[in-house]
Amino acid sequence: MSKKVAFLQGNEAATYGALYAGCNFFAGYPITPSTEVAEVMAAELPKIGGKFIQMEDEIGAMAAILGASLAGSKVLTSTSGPGLSLKQELIGYGCIAEIPCVIYNVMRGGPSTGMPTGPSQSDVMSAKWGTHGDHPAICLTPASVQETYEEVIRAFNLSEKYRTPVMVMPDEIVAHMRERVVFPEPGEIEVVPRKAPTVSPDQYKPYDTSFGDVPPLAAFGSGYKFHVTGLNKAQDGFPTTKAELVQAEEERQVRKVDANVDDIVQFEEYQLADAEVVVVAYGSTSRSARYAVNVAREQGIKAGMFRIKTFWPFPDKQIKALAAKVKGFVIPEMNLGMCSLEIERNAQGKAPVLGIFRVDGEPINPDQILAKIKEVK
């Protein structure tokens, strides 16, 4: 039997990916260029008994999904740069309280209001450093409409598996382009359920590390009573200032992601077997990069592309390995060098890093990338 196929916008595909993953609660506030997610969710969630709510602002939207997640729902919110800035305090709350949720953020020009309808890739650092304190960070950067659908499903799976907020960050081009999407059959893509407690309510502790770095999470209303706070806490969820408990707790929260990078980090390697020049790209910019690599090959230049699908945790191991054997890196990105700094950190001076930075609301084209490839000696 042939699969269902549709011609969808990236934002629409994200919504259907969330529904496939079991999302049954959405809270958000309209903001360009992500509003289509809210529009589709408003239409689709009531059909499956889910809940849609438009909040008074982005802060309220983030608070709403955290509450719904604690009540047992799989939750989503969507936003863009200024809205992500407003959400940051509660994203930090989600991290320390270890509340699964997915934040779909379409990157546009900035800072502040910037260029609301122009593409950008300038939010990737906010995904890791936007909220204060040490905390885990998972951020996915899809490059096509089909991949947006699939990466949103993966975001829900990672959020549930590691009990943490996960961000999906397409740029505006990916979010608004339309492409063919093939819908998977139910069960074709794994959907990870939330790990429920196996002990009785009177024995349950929401942060019981005897179950490992990711403790089971009960749902409010299911007979389990427990305390949730934004303060450092003991295994029972109540606040603590004991130095040894605070140290261990924060290290565990970061470790549950950092110790599982091989499970979380995904990337694409293109023409890298004999590459002497490597273009590192993500999002829509990687599409120009692929074209430029093909043209470079036709001209006898051994170029290849490393495409970042998981921006955080950053693919440190892979970049370090490439730096040891290539002549140089070319980094095209629609910001002023955010990814380039990460490449330089990993290259450790072994290979030069040449950046192409645009923040004028226009995409980076293949000719720009090809010209920079030719600069690598």
Image (spheres, rainbow, N blue to C red):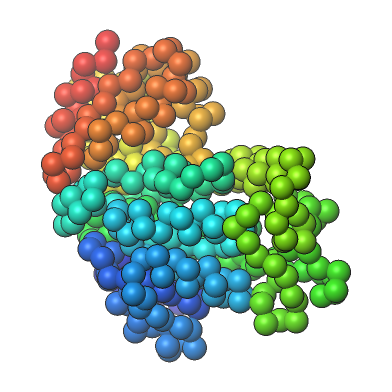
Q: Answer with the quarter of the image where residue 286 lies.
A: top left
Quarter of the rendering occupied by the C terminus: top left
Residue sitting at x 48%, y 59%: 90
Residue sitting at x 16%, y 30%: 368
Q: Answer with the quarter of the image where residue 167 lies.
A: bottom left
The one of 1 and 52 positioned closer to us in this rendering = 52
Whether residue 303 is visible, yes or no, is: no
Relative height, residue 207 to residue 50 (above, below): above
Quarter of the rendering occupied by the N terminus: bottom left
Quick check: 140 left or right of 71?
left
User: x and y percent of residue 166 in the render?
Assistant: 50, 55
The one of 340 and 279 positioned closer to us in this rendering = 340
The one of 317 and 337 positioned closer to us in this rendering = 337
Relative height, residue 121 to residue 370 (above, below): below
User: x and y percent of residue 301 in the render?
Assistant: 26, 20
The one of 240 and 271 positioned closer to us in this rendering = 240
Residue sitting at x 44%, y 19%: 347
| Residue placed furthest toward the front | 241
Residue sitting at x 29%, y 31%: 337
Quick check: 160 left or right of 318?
right
User: x and y percent of residue 291 in the render?
Assistant: 23, 37
Whether residue 263 is visible, yes or no, is: yes
Q: Answer with the quarter of the image where residue 11 lies.
A: bottom left
Q: How many marks?
A: 0
Relative height, residue 366 to residue 119 (above, below): above
User: x and y percent of residue 363 in the render?
Assistant: 17, 43
Quick check: 198 left or right of 164?
right
